[in-house]
């Protein structure tokens, strides 16, 4: 296998790791960042970034079929295809997929709940027919909080607290009546993620991390929006063992992520990501491994030897605090670089900051300093 096609919203990290292994890398993605173009041999992107032009709002402009159409033009030349977040393996010939081929049950959060609930601790989850049924469910459980979330999707987009059964002063999506939204018990605790390699016969958790969620200092306007990770998580070993069991139960292969909430010593399975995760770069920095190679070998039935974490690592996804025009942001530790001169709308992702070191506090401080350097280098538009 020489030619690999990457498909998803952001393929930069995986593309760069595959390139280090000597593969020919083609990509169909949304953002089309400068550093993706330098890592891949051929790139097709939804965004056509140009100076003085706005990149728009991701939630308004992102349509999976646009990425699918670009990818299908490159399928014939690909020896293998890796699907990242924002794409589906069902789009492509099954024999070319490097990873999980049938993920519909896993990506459908309500179906996943039913798949897991008899075997693992999960928050109560409902599929209300309309907003009034959602309110009735919440009113019948006065001791619990609830959230509304899209039935499918990633990154925490659209998730909101639902704790007003009387529906007063609450903004609700019209789509809830379409069956595309679930009502889930809200576990207000710590967000933990586990990265698991699996051959299908054997699963091994290689890293756990704390997720950075809804951080307004990083410009994130979504209250549950993904903003990055800190690794490794130094809490309970139970999470590693539970993640392995979840991945095995779902018969997943390659690199997969399992998201948890921990509260008062209890651990709940929240979601499963049947693909390479947002912790990809942190795993490489902390473990000193090539995660693309680890994924490829796991899909071929081999679990590579993964060392214990060698250092701490932090990833922060930096969003625009205001509508901004960016200059050159090519600083050390800054990735997902937009083209100089483009306009980034308020709340939209701008760059990714990565940092690693021997002391977590120093590593986090270094990342925060770089974030501030980014903010100091842009012009409000």
Image (cartoon, helix red, strand yellow):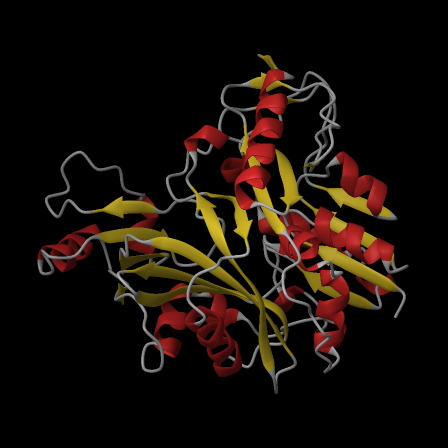
- The quadrant of the image that shows the N terminus is bottom right
Residue 205's place in the image compared with 37, above or below, is below
Q: Locate residue 351, reporting x and y percent.
A: 63, 33
- Judging depth in this view, the residue of 71 and 124 nearest the camera is 124
As drawn, is 60 to the left or to the right of 127?
right
Residue 346's place in the image compared with 380, above or below, is below
As drawn, is 121 to the left or to the right of 259?
left
**Residue at position x 69%, y 47% from top?**
29
Q: Would you identify the image quadrant in which residue 269 lies? A: bottom left
Residue 219 makes an appearance in the image = no
Residue 40 makes an appearance in the image = yes
Residue 255's place in the image compared with 341, above or below, is below
Q: Locate residue 78, reporting x and y percent.
A: 84, 64
Q: Locate residue 104, reporting x and y percent.
A: 51, 70
Q: Looking at the image, how many numbered discs can be counted on the residues? A: 0
- Judging depth in this view, the residue of 156 and 373 nearest the camera is 373
**Residue at position x 61%, y 87% from top?**
201
Q: Locate residue 187, reporting x and y percent.
A: 28, 57
Outermost residue toward the front?
359
- The quadrant of the image that shows the C terminus is top right
- Judging depth in this view, the residue of 205 and 14 nearest the camera is 205
As drawn, is 291 to the left or to the right of 157?
right
**Residue at position x 77%, y 44% from top?**
44
**Residue at position x 31%, y 53% from top?**
189
Q: Would you identify the image quadrant in which residue 349 lies? A: top right
As drawn, is 223 to the left or to the right of 218?
left
């Amino acid at each position: 296998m020489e030619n690999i096609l990457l498909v998803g919203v952001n393929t930069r990290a995986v593309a760069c790791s595959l390139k280090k292994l000597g593969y020919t890398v083609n990509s169909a993605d949304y953002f089309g960042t400068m550093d993706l173009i330098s890592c891949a041999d051929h790139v097709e992107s939804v965004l056509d970034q140009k100076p003085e032009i706005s990149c728009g709002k991701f939630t308004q402009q992102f349509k999976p079929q646009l990425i699918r159409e670009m990818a299908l033009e490159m399928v014939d030349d690909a020896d293998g295809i890796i699907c990242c977040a924002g794409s589906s393996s069902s789009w492509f010939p099954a024999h070319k997929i490097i990873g999980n081929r049938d993920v519909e049950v896993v990506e459908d959060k309500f179906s996943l709940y039913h798949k897991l609930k008899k075997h693992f601790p999960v928050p109560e989850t409902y599929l209300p027919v309309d907003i009034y049924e959602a309110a009735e469910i919440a009113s019948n459980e006065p001791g619990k909080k609830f959230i509304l979330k899209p039935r499918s999707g990633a990154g925490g987009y659209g998730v909101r607290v639902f704790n007003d059964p009387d529906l007063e002063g609450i903004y609700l999506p019209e789509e809830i009546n379409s069956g595309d939204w679930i009502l889930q018990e809200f576990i207000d605790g710590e967000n933990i993620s586990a990265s698991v390699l699996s051959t299908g016969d054997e699963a091994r958790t290689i890293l756990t991390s704390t997720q950075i969620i809804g951080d307004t200092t990083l410009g994130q306007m979504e209250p549950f929006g993904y903003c990055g990770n800190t690794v490794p998580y130094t809490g309970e070993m139970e999470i590693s063992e539970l993640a392995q069991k979840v991945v095995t139960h779902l018969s997943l292969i390659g690199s997969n992520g399992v998201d948890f909430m921990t509260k008062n010593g209890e651990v709940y399975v929240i979601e499963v990501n049947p693909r390479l995760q947002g912790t990809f770069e942190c795993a490489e920095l902390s473990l000193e491994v090539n995660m693309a190679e680890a994924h490829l070998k796991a899909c071929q039935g081999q679990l590579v030897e993964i060392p214990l974490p060698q250092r701490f690592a932090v990833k922060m996804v930096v969003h625009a605090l205001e509508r901004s025009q960016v200059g050159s942001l090519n600083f050390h530790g800054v990735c997902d670089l937009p083209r100089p001169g483009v306009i980034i709308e308020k709340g939209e992702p701008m760059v990714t900051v990565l940092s690693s070191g021997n002391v977590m506090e120093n590593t986090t401080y270094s990342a925060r300093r770089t974030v501030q350097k980014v903010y100091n280098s842009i012009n409000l538009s």
